[in-house]
Image: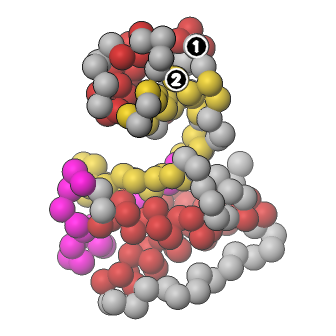
Amino acid sequence: MLTKEEWKYLFTLVREILKGAFSKRELEVLPSPQKDFPHLYEKRGVFVTLYLKGSLRGCIGTIFPEKPLYEEIKEVALSSAFRDPRFPPLQERELEEIEIEISLLSPLQKAKLEEIEVGKHGIYIKKGYKRGLLLPQVATEHNWDKETFLRHTCLKAGLPSDGYLDPEVEIYVFTAEICKESEVL
């Protein structure tokens, strides 16, 4: 579990990265977190979700990180703001109104259908090159039951909605440590 100070560091970092993108000065070297922030040096899956006036404005992440969290979040934040194909790129005028949410993922674990717990687990489904992921909070926010959650994850993967019943489909679960910027700043 991240400390409040570690969360503050991440949210400040995301804000600075996004501001830098608009001023055309990308942070060349990220300021390293203090040594007493050990969790920020871990390699963890991370998603940055942006909301504008309560509506989703971008959400991109990684489940197979290659860098420490404090470095990985840079690319994830920029992708969420400027490369989410569902939305136009973030505009500078929107930056002050953006609400940021960060989700830190546990490692993926292969799961059977009966092991999935709505409200606790996120789902990652894959079959061949088709893959889809939904964070744990998505099911809760939409008040979905397990079947609905699985169906939407399949659709996100480009599979039929009942694709989770296919024996060739692999299902993984994970948990997430979720924090909103307003909770720590």
For this rendering, which residue is in front, 37 or 41? 41
Question: How is the model colour-coded?
Answer: secondary structure
Q: Which mark is residue 171?
A: 2
Q: Nearer the viewer, residue 33 or 98?
A: 33
Q: Residue at x 57, y 28 (%)?
A: 173
Q: Give yes or no for residue 163 being in the magenta stretch.
A: no
Q: Quadrant of residue 120?
A: top right
Q: Is residue 108 above or below residue 47?
A: above
For marks 1 and 2, the one nearer the N-term is 1
Q: Determine which residue is flagged by label 1.
A: 112
The location of residue 121, given as percent across then percent down, is 54, 28
Above or below for 127 versus 184: above
Task: Please say if the residues under marks 1 and 2 sit with CB atoms less than 8 Å apart.
Answer: yes
Residue located 52% across and 88% down the image? 28
Residue 103 image position (x, y, % from top left): 52, 49
Instruction: Tell me where residue 84 sits by quadrant.
Output: bottom left
Residues drawn in magenta? 85-103
- Residue 167 rendering spot, x and y as whole percentages: 48, 11
